[in-house]
Each structure stands twice: as C-alpha cells, then as structure tokens.
Image (cartoon, grey):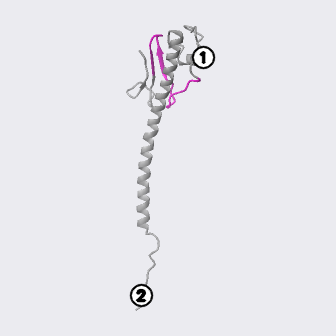
Amino acid sequence: MKSRRYNQDGFTLIEIMVVILILGLLATIVVQSLRGAADKAKRVKAQADLAEYKTALDRYYLDNGTYPSTDQGLSALVTPPSSGRIPANYESGGYIERMTKDPWGGAYFYQSDGSAYVLKSYGPDGTESADDIDASRS
C-alpha cells in the first residue's frame, strides 16, 4: 500500500473565524474605552475654559471694582462694554483674546450683580442638571 501524505499547510475556516471573532471583541473594547476618554477630555476642556474666564473676571474686578453685569456678559472681557456701568480702568487689549463655546457647542452661562457671579457650562445635555460644570464666585 502506498502511503498518502496530506498537505496540512494553511488555516481552516474555523481557525480564521475564531481569529476574526477575537479581533472584533478587542475592537469593541477599544472603542468603548476611547468613547469614555473623549467625554473626559471635553469635561477637562470646559474646566480649563472656566478657569481662564475666572482669572479674567478677577483681573477685571481688580481693575474696575466690579464684575461685568449680566447684560454686559463675558464679552466684556474681550472688548470694553459700551452700556451699563462703563469700566474706568479697562485693560488695553482686553482680559482674554476671544470667547469660545463649551466643548458641546453651547455658550457658557454667566450671570452677575457686580459683586458676585455665576459661571458654568451646562455640560453635554445643554440644560441645568447635576452634570453641570460650575465655576461661580459668591
């Protein structure tokens, strides 16, 4: 009798499907962890923006003895206000270079009576809720 040798080179269909399944599971895990990192990065960006605005508001207060009014808004940090209480010692060039939106595309909320202010981002849902990022000073 002749002995037959079968060529066993290559992979079977089952082996290839197992590898594809494992790669799919790994890709799912990586995508889920990246999604969480993007959300965290947006929160950190909003906190950094609010810290910059707080510093600018404090400098405005030191120069003028009052915070910009609600009507003047945060734009008073970029250009001198032309209505309401006009600042006497406004820093040339403004207190910040430009206004930005929060990382979710909304405007930062600012409200002030001149001696204290509320400054916050409404977060990903865009409404006042527990996930707001608050940088108010009272």
- Residue 41, relative to residue 18: is it above or below? above
Q: Which residue corresponds to the image point at 56% horizontal and 19% vertical from the top-left?
A: 95
Nearest the viewer among 21 and 44 is: 44
Give the camera-side residue of 9 and 24.
9
Region rendered in magenta: 97-119
In the image, residue 86 lies at what x, y percent?
57, 8
Amino acid type for the residue under numbered disc 2: Ser
Residue depicted at 54% across the width and 14% down the height: 72
- The tally of labels here is 2
Residue 24, visible in the rendered structure? yes
Q: Name the residue tied to disc 1.
A: 79
Q: Report the residue at 43% width, 17% height from top.
A: 137
Mark 2 is surrounded, within 10 Å at the Cα level, by few (under 14), some (14 to 19) or many (20 or more) other residues, namely few
Which sits earlier in the primary sequence, circle 2 or circle 1?
2
Which residue is label 2 attached to? 3
Whole-Å distance between the Cαs marked 2 and 1?
Answer: 92 Å
Judge whether residue 117 is colored magenta. yes
Label 1 secondary element: loop
Q: Main secondary structure of the magenta part?
A: loop
Q: From the viewer's perspective, tell me whether residue 16 is left or right of residue 82.
A: left
Residue type (three-letter) at the residue carrying disc 1: Thr
Q: Quadrant location of residue 92?
A: top right
Residue 136 position within the rendered picture, expressed as x and y whole percent measured from the top left = 43, 19
